Image: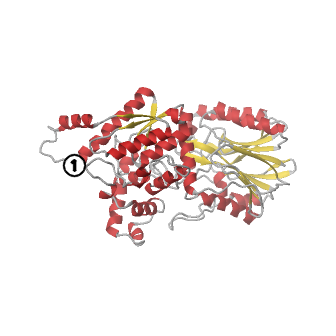
Amino acid sequence: MKVELAQLNYTIGDFEGNSKKIIGKIESAKEQNVDLVLFSELSVTGYYPHDLLEKKEFIKKAEDAVAEIAKVCVGIAALVGAPRINENERGKTLFNSAFFLSDGKIQSIHNKTLLPTYDIFDEYRHFEPNREFHIVEYKGERIAVTICEDLWDEQPTANEFGKDKLYSISPMEELAKLNPDFVVNLSASPFSYNQEGWRKDVLVKKAKNYGIPILYCNQVGAQTELIFDGGSVFIDRDGEIIKELKYFEEDALILDTKNIGEKSLQNEADYIEKIHDALVLGIRDYFQKMGFKRATLGLSGGIDSAVVAVLAVRALGPENVRVLLMPSKYSSDHSVEDARILAENLGIRHDIVHIQKAVDAFEKELALLFEGCSADVTEENIQARTRGIFVMAISNKFGHILLNTTNKSESAVGYGTLYGDMNGGLAVLGDVYKLDVYRLSRFMNRDGEIIPENTIVKPPSAELRPDQKDTDSLPDYEDLDVMLFNYIELNKSPREIADMGFDEEIVRKVVRMVNMNEYKRFQAAPILRISSKAFGFGRKMPLVARY
């Protein structure tokens, strides 16, 4: 059987656009004598629609789209993902389903069994789990249909408190009893640099354990925070990956299940390169799918804003990026010069706005209110908030979306000013630790200097007071990032982290800072997720707690 894996980029709720892509792929597949085209999970609606699934009109449009797609499936079959109304008297209103389409109509429907409800996933909020298993018989082949998590009943655990068997049932085990010739999996599996290998391991293990080939079709593209990296694969019955599609871009592959041919895999990339590509895709899709075109940000001469500027240019083009340089009396001359050189290297418009007069005006008006008080972090924050006013004015006046430049290390410990440097419509580096920001800068300069070397090598500073350094308030990032990763991603206790060789008092101080600053992160811009545990809706913590 000739099967095409169609790895496409969908937009949530764009029924017309998504259907047009799907139908276009089916029509082109017909011309190549393809028997079956495989699309990804919830391809008709885009993944994940969240509470749009509670709107009757939304579900009706999904049903109509599936019916229209079915009409073109004559002389060819397709598997598409969409929500389906649960007709049973009990249970949730919907199923997360795969529709097998041929002869111009829906031939069978296959519902998702395992509904992830952890981290970023909340599918049990909307969907009823499947309890019945059946296969597709088509052109002499017996096809087992699974949807994403259905192959993930066993998972590696990120911490010792978790289980590797998350569910009480294994869809693969049930379907294997029906003797399928191969398994297809419609997936929407988001990118995570520190769990990326798990996905292949899970798929390989399933194919090998059951001796059944797997055709895995993943989504690609970004849906606000979530970035889907594609990487669809064919795995043979021995658990060997034979075919692999591209990462971070649309792709397609036609294969004959009886004659797979030679191995064709993607070149292995370093994790920093993958983070880079994920962030570029995340910015580009956020802007295109929201109907935005231009971006702005404050360019300080520091590493974070430099990296965001490069990513923005690569995602949107230099003609669509405008930056502001906003020195105060504490800004060093080399910071302004570094920012100017970077802007010229990137070919983007840059304007210099000296904020000191505005800061002085605020301080003058506040003097009476602050009478008898010594200067402290309040005055530092006035500078950050003054910069926020200028970049937001550019955003409002010219329709530029402000990109936030705060990195994950800073966000974790609250090293940022609400309504100042935490402003923005999208947090580009909010899931990237500081040391990885430096690694990104080196990657960007691999073919020649774009980011000035001085920006990379100078000690990081917010430049809000004389000779300020980040290490005045924080441990070295070499230590801080390790502590944070173990606390946030791996859920280790302060004692366990201290046992790794860190001073326990410092560890507890860092943990306390993480816990105390949840209220700041709650108000922050949406973050492009590139790890297994990003701040945002994938990490739900109480704002008020004594822990």
Query: Relative to 301, is 61 on the left or the right?
Result: right
| Foreground residue among 24 and 56 | 24
In this rendering, does residue 428 appear at all?
Answer: no
* Location of residue 396 with respect to 198 vertically, above or below: above
* Location of residue 353 with respect to 539 vertically, above or below: above
Farthest residue, direction left:
372
- Which residue type carries mark 1? Asp
Horizontal and vertical percent position of residue 430: 45, 49
Query: Relative to 432, is 140 on the left or the right?
Result: right
Q: Which residue is mark 1?
A: 376
Farthest residue, direction right:
140
In this rendering, does residue 473 appear at all?
Answer: yes
Horizontal and vertical percent position of residue 420: 34, 41
Disc 1 is placed on an element classified as loop
Quarter of the image where one finds residue 352: top left
Q: Quadrant of the C terminus?
A: bottom left
**What residue is shown at x 52% (from left), y 45% (from top)?**
225
Horizontal and vertical percent position of residue 477: 40, 59
* Location of residue 225 with respect to 160 vertically, above or below: above
Query: Relative to 203, is 382 on the left or the right?
Result: left
